[in-house]
Amino acid sequence: MNDDGQPYLYPPELFSVPDSRQPSDWITEFGDDGEQYSYPEPLNKAGFFEDFFDHKPEQTLMFWHTLNRTLTKTA
């Protein structure tokens, strides 16, 4: 999330990963340049984030529902 509370793709070199474990219900894929994309299953559909950033209601609702459910699990 960026400072505006929106999803954002940050360059991987900004991160160090001390623990590479991921939630078991996330799907991981790799891009053409080796970049890693990991999302909960509902957000891992082709075109999901394009639709989200186009403010389509179904994707907007699904994003916030999934994020809130994920944050609730960690609390």
Image: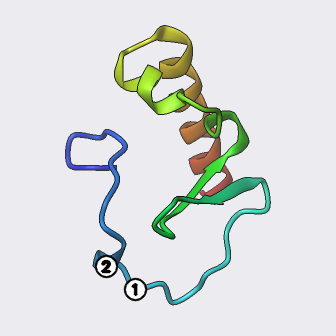
Residue placed furthest toward the right: 24
Q: Residue at x 67, y 59 (%)?
A: 28
Q: Quadrant of residue 5?
A: top left
Type of amino acid under label 1: Ser
Give left or right: position of 55 versus 60. left
Does dot 1 land on a helix, a strand or a loop?
loop
Which residue is at the front of the view, 26 or 13?
13
Residue assigned mark 2: 13
Residue displayed at 21% across by 40% down: 4
Q: CA distance from mark 1 to mark 2?
A: 8 Å
**Residue 27: image location, x then y, percent:** 71, 54
Q: Position of residue 36 (x, y in %)?
A: 53, 65
Q: Residues within 10 Å of mark 1 (few under 14, many from 20)?
A: few
Residue 41's place in the image compared with 34, above or below, is: above
User: Going by the image, does 69 lie left or right of 50?
Assistant: right
Question: Residue 8 bears which disc, if any?
Answer: none
Q: Position of residue 49 (x, y in %)?
A: 46, 32
**Residue 30 left/right relative to 52:** right
Q: Look at label 2 and name its amino acid.
A: Glu
Q: Say few, some or many: other residues with alpha carbon within 10 Å of mark 2 (under 14 / 14 to 19 / 20 or more).
A: few
Q: Which mark is residue 16?
A: 1
Work out which residue is located at the far bottom of the displayed protein and give it: 18
- The relative height of residue 68 versus residue 32 in the rendered view (above or below) is above
